């Protein structure tokens, strides 16, 4: 069944880009001749004018296209550089924050050592004073 559908499609297939020798884009006729077609008839000047206008429009469109592409490219480059600067500044900010945190941790470690020494030194000093007072009370 599927083969039948495929064969039917091939049976109706035609070449789209076929061009016959009789299919001309334009025909030159002389005065007093009748045109072998129905449609518009242009003089050489009108045809030249039409072609030059068409080429001018194409050139203007190409220039507009190139200008728009350059503007878009510059806009994207500007946005890219702006984003790059933003990310670099954020990266530097986070690196600075990490450095500040590390410095704070080192300071708090030093404070911990000083606090421990002060605590144990106070304990030893208080014990010595208590022993000294107790000894002097017992001597009298």
Image: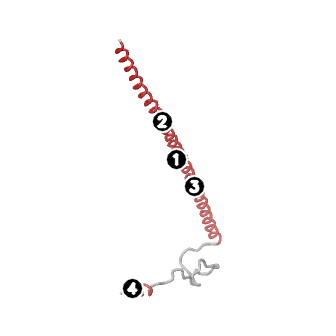
Please rate how many residues cluster around mark 4, counting C-alpha atoms within 10 Å: few if below 14, some from 14 to 19, many from 20: few
Question: Which marked residue is nearer to the observer: mark 2 or mark 3?
Answer: 2
Q: Earlier in the sequence, mark 3 or mark 1?
A: 3
Q: Earlier in the sequence, mark 4 or mark 2?
A: 4
| Mark 3 vs mark 1, CA separation in Å | 21 Å
Marks 3 and 1: CB-CB under 8 Å?
no
Task: Kindly state the secondary structure of the residue where label 4 is placed.
Answer: helix
Identify the mark at residue 104; answer none if there is no mark: 2
Q: Which residue is mark 4?
A: 5
* Residue depicted at 49% across the width and 41% down the height: 98
* Residue depicted at 41% across the width and 85% down the height: 6
Give percent across and percent down for residue 37: 55, 80
Q: Which residue is mark 3?
A: 73
| Mark 1 vs mark 2, CA separation in Å | 25 Å
Q: Which residue is mark 1?
A: 87
Furthest residue in direction front, as rendered: 139
Give percent across and percent down for residue 49: 63, 67
Work out whether residue 21 or residue 8 is closer to the camera in this orientation and state it: 8
* Residue depicted at 38% across the width and 88% down the height: 4
Q: Earlier in the sequence, mark 4 or mark 3?
A: 4
Question: What is the basis of the colouring in this image?
Answer: secondary structure
Task: Kindly state the secondary structure of the residue where label 1 is placed.
Answer: helix
Give percent across and percent down for residue 26: 60, 77
Question: Which marked residue is nearer to the observer: mark 4 or mark 1?
Answer: 1
Q: Earlier in the sequence, mark 1 or mark 2?
A: 1
Please rate how many residues cluster around mark 3, counting C-alpha atoms within 10 Å: few if below 14, some from 14 to 19, many from 20: few
């Amino acid at each position: 069944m599927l083969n039948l559908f495929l064969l039917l499609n091939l049976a109706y297939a035609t070449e789209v880009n076929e061009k016959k020798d009789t299919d001309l884009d334009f025909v030159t006729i002389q005065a007093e001749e009748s045109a072998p077609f129905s449609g518009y008839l242009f003089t050489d000047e009108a045809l030249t004018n039409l072609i030059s206008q068409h080429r001018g429009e194409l050139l203007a469109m190409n220039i507009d296209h190139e200008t728009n592409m350059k503007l878009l490219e510059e806009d994207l480059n500007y946005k890219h550089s702006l984003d790059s600067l933003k990310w670099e500044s954020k990266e530097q900010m986070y690196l600075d924050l990490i450095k500040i945190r590390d410095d704070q941790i080192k300071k708090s470690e030093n404070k911990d050592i000083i606090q421990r020494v002060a605590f144990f030194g106070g304990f030893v000093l208080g014990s010595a004073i208590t022993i000294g007072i107790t000894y002097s009370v017992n001597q009298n």
